[in-house]
Image (spheres, rainbow, N blue to C red):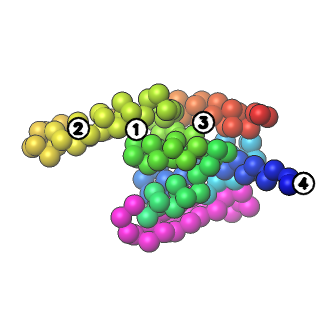
Amino acid sequence: MSQDPEPPAPLILVDADACPVKDEVYRVAERYAVAVTIVANSFIRIPDDPLISRVIVSDGFDAADDWIVEHAHGQALVITADILLAERCLKAGAAALSPKGTAFTENSIGAAVATRAIMADLRAGGEQIGGPAPFTRADRSRFLQVMDASLRRLLKPQ
């Protein structure tokens, strides 16, 4: 008789180089006792907490993204502003959330990728388009609410 392998433990993976909500991630993860891995191309200070770890990858193109995707699974929540990374994580079975509180889903990721491509084409064609809107308190609040809900779904017994 073979036993089914135990499902992976819940995990939060953070694309950390320019993430404005790391402190919020730490607080919510502590409340739910979920491990957090901060992934970056350079040293980032993290709290001294056994649930929080840091992975420093090479500065190679997409090194952090590749590491995150390799470790993403059905019990992982990935925090990233990178739409293409979010798409890869969804394909790996993970949940993905932007720092502004947008939950990327199978239904929404196609439109997000298409919009990103259109904006890149406009910029490449010399169009002067603004960058992303500044990060606000409302974004931070929305992120906390959506992250909390995402973790509750992740931790709900199947």
Q: Are marks 1 and 2 in contact (CB under 8 Å)?
A: no
Residue at (74% x, 61% y) in the render: 50
Q: Which mark is residue 1?
A: 4
- Cα separation between marks 3 and 1: 16 Å
Q: Are marks 3 and 4 in contact (CB under 8 Å)?
A: no
Q: Is residue 58 magenta?
A: yes
Q: Amino acid at mark 3?
A: Met
- Of labels 3 and 1, earlier in sequence is 1
Q: Residue furthest front?
A: 1
Mark 1 or 4, closer to the camera: 4
- Of labels 3 and 2, earlier in sequence is 2
Q: Are marks 3 and 1 in contact (CB under 8 Å)?
A: no
Q: Which residues are magenta?
A: 38-62
- Cα separation between marks 3 and 2: 27 Å
Quadrant occupied by the C terminus: top right
- Of labels 3 and 4, earlier in sequence is 4
Query: Is 102 in front, or is 136?
Result: 102
**Label 3 Cα neighbours within 10 Å, binned few <14 / some 14-19 / many ≥20:** many
* Local SS, label 1: loop
* Local SS, label 2: helix
**Label 2 Cα neighbours within 10 Å, binned few <14 / some 14-19 / many ≥20:** some
- Cα separation between marks 1 and 4: 54 Å
In this picture, residue 1 sits left or right of residue 154: right
- Of labels 1 and 2, earlier in sequence is 2
